[in-house]
Image (cartoon, rainbow, N blue to C red):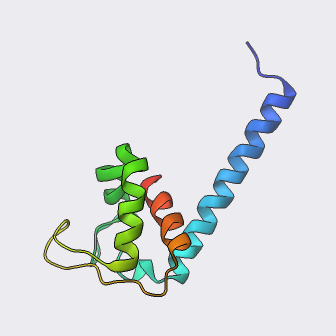
Amino acid sequence: MKPTFLERTLLGATLMAVAATAAADAALAERKFCFSCHHATETGLGPSFQAIAARHGARRAQMAPVLAYKIQHGGGGNWGVVPMVPSQNVSEADATALARWILGL
């Protein structure tokens, strides 16, 4: 069955909103200096965002708070010997938004 004009319009609007949110979250990652250690698809000082999503994306709901905590407070031992330093300039809301963005990649 062919989608109606309204269905196509709503789908288009939804896709535009998702794209805008993803762009805003990528800009947030840039502002919070996440790209200093992480890259989208390649390993840098830390794992790529794509690798993090591949490892934890299937358990997005459970891992988003864990990742948000690690963004704010740091962590280590999960990706090698280099620990992630705490990001004290990242609020809890921003850490949650970043975690959801990363896990959704």
> Which image quadrant is residue 73 in?
bottom left
Name the residue rendered at 20%, 74% in the picture: 76
The residue at the far top in this view is 1
As drawn, is 29 to the left or to the right of 1? left
The residue at the far left in this view is 81
The residue at the far right in this view is 5
Residue 64 at x, y percent in the picture: 42, 57
Residue 68 at x, y percent in the picture: 42, 67
Vertical arrangement, residue 11 with respect to residue 50, above or below: above
Instruction: Give the mark count.
Output: 0
Residue 56, can we see it?
Answer: yes
As drawn, is 103 to the left or to the right of 70? right
Residue 18 at x, y percent in the picture: 65, 52
Residue 87 at x, y percent in the picture: 40, 83
Q: Nearer the viewer, residue 59 or 18?
A: 59
> Which image quadrant is residue 51 in?
bottom left
Residue 39, can we see it?
Answer: no
**Quarter of the picture holding the N terminus:** top right
Vertical arrangement, residue 55 with respect to residue 68, above or below: above
As drawn, is 64 to the left or to the right of 46? right
Q: Nearer the viewer, residue 50 or 102?
A: 102
Name the residue rendered at 33%, 59% in the picture: 52
As drawn, is 86 to the left or to the right of 11? left
Name the residue rendered at 68%, 46% in the picture: 15
Vertical arrangement, residue 83 with respect to residue 49, above or below: below
Name the residue rendered at 75%, 41% in the picture: 12
